Image (spheres, rainbow, N blue to C red):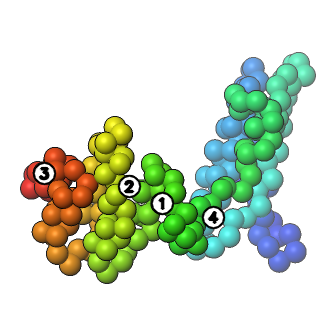
Amino acid sequence: MLFKTKIGKKEAYLYILLEHQSSPDELMPFRLLKYLCNIMDNHLKSQKAKKLPLVYPLVIYHGKRKYPFSTNLSDLIDAPKELVDSYFLKPFQLMDLGQIDDKVLKQHAWSGVMEFALKHIFARDILPYLKEIADILHKLTLSGGRHYIEIVLQYLLERGELSDQSKFFSLINKEIFPDVGEKIMSLQNN
């Protein structure tokens, strides 16, 4: 049963789940989470709201024996307690690439080239940015990262703006790795 009420001037919901199972459910906290998310999602859609409502879950259990399982969702997570306490249902970590200097991104070769590509993908011309990381891409190709580099370059080609596509492939063939440019060109033609 779902009851809608007001707390102050804000809408809130009281969700009462009548437990009619003959045996308690160890995953009840997870079931409740799914129900709560559905209620919140429905509220956002039906009310065209920008904020989530408070939903207070209440499970009424009427089994013959005492309820044997934890009511805490975090107890269901199969990880060390310290990690669960530190990360589960906490604010997510945000990496705002627009606020990170390009020099810092380029210091982390493997992750940095993709982050650099993501950061500059909406530039009017992606070619100058490709030139900035060409040497890093070349080194990564030589150290076993060829497939990864193909993915980065394919992303730049498909999503970025290019003033001159022939210069893009020329740069790849001369400064990164000839076969990589050919592979991307063949993918583009398919």
Any mark on residue 106, and which? Answer: 1
In the rendered image, residue 132, in percent from the top left (x then y), is placed at 37, 67
Q: Residue at x 74, y 52 (%)?
A: 90
Tag 3 residue: 182
Nearer to us: label 3 or label 4: 3
Q: Are marks 1 and 2 in contact (CB under 8 Å)?
A: yes
SS class of the residue under badge 2? Answer: helix
Q: Which residue is mark 2?
A: 136
Q: In the figure, 87 relative to 98: above or below?
A: above
Q: Amino acid at mark 1?
A: Lys
Q: Residues within 10 Å of mark 4 (few under 14, many from 20)?
A: some
Residue at mark 3 to residue at mark 4: CA–CA distance: 51 Å
The amino acid type found where label 2 is placed reads: Ile
Nearest to viewer (mark 4 / mark 2): 2
Residue at left 81%, top 53%? 56
**Residue 82 location in percent, x, y?**
81, 36
Vertical position of residue 62 compared to residue 6: above or below: above
Q: Residue at x 69, y 65 (%)?
A: 52
- The first of marks 3 and 1 along the sequence is 1
Q: Residue at x 55, y 63 (%)?
A: 104
Q: Residue furthest bottom?
A: 124
Q: Provide residue 22's location: percent of width, then percent of height.
A: 74, 20
Res 80 → quadrant: top right
Residue 60 in the image: state x and y as whole percent: 83, 37
Mark 4 vs 2, N-terminal side: 4
Amino acid bearing label 4: His
Mark closer to the chain start, 3 or 4: 4
Q: N-terminal of the two: label 3 or label 2?
A: 2
Lateral position of residue 91 relative to residue 183, left or right? right
- Real-space Cα distance between discs 1 and 4? 43 Å
The nearer-to-camera label among 1 and 4 is: 1
